[in-house]
Amino acid sequence: MAQFETAIAIASAVRSGRRRALDVVDEHLARIAESESDIHAFNVVTAAEARAAAAVIDKRVAAGDDPGPLAGVPVALKDNMCTRGIPTTCSSNILKGWRPPYSAAVVDRLSNAGAILIGKTNMDEFAMGSSTENSAFGPTRNPHDLTRAPGGSSGGSAAAVAAGFVPISLGSDTGGSIRQPAALCGVVGVKPTYGLVSRYGLIAFASSLDQIGPFSHSVADSALVCEIIGGHDPRDSTSLPQGFPAVSGQLGAGVHGLRVGRITNLPCGADADVLARLDAAFDFLAHAGAIIVDVEVPAFGYGLTSYYLVAPAEASSNLARYDGVRYGQRVDAADTEKMMIATRTRGFGDEVKRRIMLGTYALSAGYYDAYYGKALKVRRLIAQDFDAAYQHCDVMLTPASPTVAFPFGSKGDNPLAMYLCDVFTIPTNLAGHPAMSVPFGTGAEGLPVGVQILAPSLGEAGMFRTAVALEEAMQ
Amino acid sequence: MSDTHVSGIANPITPEPTDYIDGYEIVIGLECHAELATNTKIFCGCANRFGDEPNTNICPVCLGLPGSLPVLNRQVVELAIRLGVALDCTVQGSIFHRKNYFYPDMPKDYQVTQYDVPIDINGHLMLANGKRIGITRAHLEEDTGKSTHVGETGRIHGSSHSLVDYNRAGIPLLEIVSEPELRNGDDARAYLTELRAILEATGVSDAKMEEGSLRCDANVSVHRPGTPYGTRCEVKNLNSIRSLGRAIDYEARRQIRLVESGETVRQETRHWDEADGRTHTLRVKEDADDYRYFPEPDLVPIVITAEWIDGVRGTLPLLPAARRARLTQAADGAGSADSVALLVERGRDDYVLNAIAAGADPGRALVHVENNLPPDGIIVVSPGDLAALTQLEVSGKLTATQAKTVLVDLIALDGIGDPAAIAAERGFEAMDTSVLDAAVDSAIASQPDTWAKYLAGDPKVAGALVGAVMKATHGKADGKAVTAALNARRDANG
């Protein structure tokens, strides 16, 4: 893949007047025009709005004004973040054509920093999936190999960065939906600590797990975006009171003395080429002065089963509102109940229906204690086990994905095989901890491999330091 | 339809204040929903206001638009604490759940409500008649929108389409659940009357049943004492305190009729029809509804400190039960419990207390305020003037009838005038004690047989003696004074 400019480099050039934001936007639109038909990263490209916004940035710079740390940087948003007046669909037929009357908190924060929205990206419908094949509008293709999936559910955002359509994009991560596609597309992807980035305007999949985070080429770009979109928002009750930890200033601090955990009871299932890259990462970090520590997280392996009760349960409730009464698609029928049934039958895809049914079942009277209630207990256990392990280490490394990018259709008939894609990423969502994927070389067939860095709650500084070290190892 | 079983029941039925009907005990529990008197909705900044144009007080949050999130209104918690303290509840840190079911006037197709950890638990309320009714819980929840079914009947069946107004969606509610300790329609009405008074007095709700800011459902069952409780039916659409009493009485008799005829009461929700005075099946609860409750992940637990509760307690006004007790004490034995309760309900207790403080005879003051002064609005007669008037009465200078006339005159003068002067103008002369004594002695002398019976303790003959005195004094004598004079002579005689 070609080397693309970083957001920091673009913003620096635009702020200093060396480059016009309009030129930056046009260059990226040109790349989109060239390859989007192959990739299908976008549900909508907002070219006219982007050029208008760029012109405003240029005027401000000309007037001596500083438009902010992302001045003139094109950005793509996963299509589950509300954008005022711009279609927001979650890649679902049920929301086709819906234009929100308000924008998500992250949209305002990016805009206030000078970033320019260039489009909304494709995703698995309602963020349910790990390949972006569950989009109602067709799959996104992996820029590294068009016969393969980009991962998911934020596949469009990952592919948009990998293809050079944008230097940065936002995704959402409920069980690995940023980190897994980042790994498969060879870009950086970050899931911050739950509560650090406002969910206001993020269309919910599983409220207690969803968290917004960036994709980028460089670790420094992701750190900057996190600092911009993070911080308390009174409109999100689960938003933490503090700002995003200051990470940008510590990126170069190195890993000397940092304790890096190797989880001894990691679930098996990762391919050998992926595990080889993980070992290489440990070796490199040890060489750079980090202390590699064996740690046990006993409940790690229960993450997947717990997740597939908690997330569908919340989803079954979150997705109830798509009933055809107020917005989105409606399929008319004889009475209100029949209309709702027809609308939801026609409007939702198979995977969404599958999870609504799973969640409905898990919450049903007589089953709650056995399923949802027990899943919540496991969730607490996972958090406790992580906390205990973090007594002995500062960060942990695991694969981000068990495999490199897989061909389309290879898991399509087997939901469980698809669910296993997230076996390494899910436990951190359950614990509410931060984690990120950084590209660390290639595996089978020259496809990218991502290493996942896990950190305790609000431990982003150590996580980013480790990421920078691994990034430097690859340069 | 089960209603065919009860087609022969007479209607309407006058409620009787008895705990048993035909040997059956009636068991009643009430679930009341009060809209809280906040400025804004429970989870967003939209106005909490009744009567605005449909769909004008709405935003992404209360419309449940994708991506919107709730933020709990602090004033809602404050008012819930307020009611909790007023009902002597345990006020506790609590959480919200989601209650999942599909309904077009519910924007998210789930209701955010409290489930197993409500904010107020284990309280009670004292009825005006002295009965203590337990409050199981009071929990917070959001109201739904309001559907209007367009078509012939105004109900959903047979309507051509429905309109939904979401102004009400997200209005904060407290659902107040009583223990099943009410035993007749009168007590149920007294409970609702008292709850309404407390909601109003504390400022928790304006509690207007006609505007729906206070709504009430009744759970009714019947059983023979000593046997297990019967199957209960929930009666809805009780839009006034009067409806509540009527509906309970009808429903209890309907159930008794069923049991008596060997049939079983079916657990169901029934709709009270004010026009025909009956309850009708609304929906049958074949299985328990499965609302798939689970903790609301978009909200954090409500943390309530002891300082917060104490602070709220310090700002509570005197509640109706305490005001009744205060008035009863000030009345010093005069006035019935009903009369005291009525005056407190009308908010006239402060006035009566002021009059008593100014020297009024408590009994006469209660009578005048209850019967001879307007039931609401401003009282133009000063407490001091009322006190002066009652003193003229008890000193025998005015009869009760004369005092009422003076009061009416004083009101007509907008309260500007002196009761004694008005009495003088009217020619209500002071009755000289010697004149009264002479008339009493004369009445006794002219009716020796009657007097003998009076002395023997027959109270029925008193009227004849008093009547004779009244005739002799041309109606100027005060009835009480005459009775007192007769009694004084009887006692001296004995």
Image: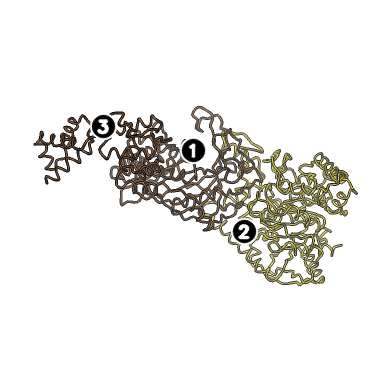
Chain colours: A yellow, B brown
Query: In the image, which is nearer the foreground, mark 2 or mark 3?
Result: 3
Which residue is situated farthest in the left direction here? B449
Q: Dots 2 and 3: beta carbons under 8 Å? A: no
Query: In the image, which is nearer the foreground, mark 3 or mark 1?
Result: 3
Residue under pointer 3: B429
- The amino acid type of the residue labelled 3 equals Glu
- The CA distance from mark 2 to mark 1 is 44 Å
Mark 1 nearby-residue class (10 Å; few <14, some 14–19, many ≥20): some
Query: In the image, which is nearer the foreground, mark 2 or mark 1?
Result: 1
Residue at 45% from the left image edge and 50% from the top image edge: B86
- Taking A452 as reference, is B88 above or below it? above
- The CA distance from mark 2 to mark 3 is 93 Å
Query: Relative to A271, is B460 on the left or the right?
Result: left
Closer to us: B157 or B242: B242
Which residue is situated farthest in the top direction here? B152
Q: Whole-percent x and y of residue B88?
A: 44, 53
Disc 1 element: loop
Q: Chain of mark 3?
A: B
- The amino acid type of the residue labelled 1 equals Gly
Q: Quadrant of residue B274?
A: top left
Mark 2 nearby-residue class (10 Å; few <14, some 14–19, many ≥20): many
Residue at 38% from the left image edge and 29% from the top image edge: B412
Residue at 37% from the left image edge and 50% from the top image edge: B132
- The CA distance from mark 3 to mark 1 is 55 Å
Disc 3 element: loop
Residue A306 bears which disc, if any?
A: 2
Closer to us: A23 or B334: B334
Residue B212 bears which disc, if any?
A: 1
Mark 3 nearby-residue class (10 Å; few <14, some 14–19, many ≥20): few
Q: Whole-percent x and y of residue A362?
A: 57, 53
